[in-house]
Image (cartoon, rainbow, N blue to C red):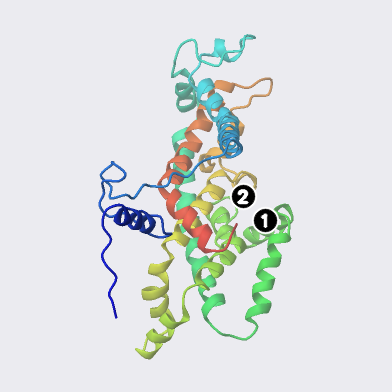
Amino acid sequence: MAHPLPLTGDGAATDAASRSARPGSVSRSGTGSGNGTGGFVPRVKRVSPAQRASAIARLMTAVVVGIVMMFPLYWMVTLAFSPNADVFSRELRIWPSSWTLDNFRTVFGSFPTATWFGNSVVITAIVTVLTVTVNLLAGYAFAKLDFRGKGAIFLMVLSTMMIPVQVLMVAQFRLVTQLGIYGTFWAVILPSAASAFGIFLARQFIIAIPDELIEAAKVDGAGPVRIFLQIILPLCKPLIAVLVLLTVMYQWNDFAWPLIALKDSQLFTLPIGLLYLRGQYGADYGAIMALALISITPIIIMFLAFQKYFVQGLARSGIR
């Protein structure tokens, strides 16, 4: 049987061209393209004009919404550092004519602002520790422990979220009065020592933790308390950050219940102190904005510090 003769001349060139034109064939010499990449040319994804216009529209919408959301904060800062002449002027000023600290001097000189700030810190810290502890323990019990009536009790806890807060204040007032703690910090702290939404959030987060970890701990002889402290709690850092931030924000800004439960002005919190800056015939808006700026600054700092864990905790808890 005769073997085919090797192609030479024009025949060899034709055969090489046909091989290079086959689908899937790649030139490995790197000289055909002239770019030194061995013939591999990166494919650039083309963006259509409609997609580009949509991206620009979303960006502009986000910028406008951000400006609208940030303008009240900017206006508060502007009035806090503006002199009274600018605050009560008929001209619209979006920038202080001269920066001044007179409003802050009025707040700290004429009112016990430092005492109010300290009261807010003490009450918020104690309430946060108690609330986060109770919510974590209750969430762990509803998520991983088996006991009779667990589903019914959990539904009862969730049903309390549908009751208006104003209705609960009547029962809370009678309770703190009968306990003899009316007019003290404990009248504000104890009714806030648990949160139905916090229990729900903790239960949703902990229920996603694999049961295999708990079963392995049980095989090693660990009890429910040890499992909670050594397995559940280390995995709940994003949840703890969410609970801490939500509790601090709610308790720090709470106004109605502390106003009812506290009767001594030396025990008032910052939200109640804002009420005292309004006179009978007028209001010092510069001082009000200065005290409001003092009040929200710790919350802003805490949110910026816990922002990453806050998003993770909400995402892993199934809250959208």
The amino acid type found where label 1 is placed reads: Phe
Which is more toward the observer, 275 or 68? 68
How far apart in space, not on screen, are marks 2 and 1 (Cα)?
A: 7 Å
Which mark sits nearer the N-terminus, 2 or 1? 1
Check the image and name the residue furthest to the front: 2
Please tell me in which quadrant of the rendered image residue 151 appears.
Answer: bottom right
Provide the secondary structure element on which disc 1 rests: helix
Please tell me in which quadrant of the rendered image residue 195 appears.
Answer: bottom right
Is residue 243 placed above or below 104 in the rendered structure?
below
| Residue 239 relative to residue 64: left or right | left
**Crowd class of label 1 (few under 14; some 14 to 19; many from 20; radius 10 Å):** some
Q: Identify the residue position indicated by label 1 in the image.
A: 173
Q: Position of residue 67 (x, y in %)?
A: 56, 29
Is residue 269 placed above or below 181 in the rendered structure?
above
Q: Position of residue 40 (x, y in %)?
A: 34, 50
Q: Position of residue 306 (x, y in %)?
A: 43, 50
Asked if one can make out residue 128 in the rendered structure from this viewpoint, the answer is no
Residue at (54, 26) in percent of width and height:
76
Residue at (52, 67) in percent of width and height:
205
Provide the secondary structure element on which disc 2 rests: helix
Q: Position of residue 258 (x, y in %)?
A: 60, 47
The amino acid type found where label 2 is placed reads: Ala
Is residue 96 placed above or below 17 in the rendered structure?
above
In the rendered image, the quadrant that contains the N terminus is bottom left
In the rendered image, the quadrant that contains the C terminus is bottom right
Q: Identify the residue position indicated by label 2 in the image.
A: 261
Asked if one can make out residue 318 in the rendered structure from this viewpoint, the answer is yes
> How many tags in the picture?
2
Is disc 2 in contact with disc 1, using a CB cutoff of under 8 Å?
yes
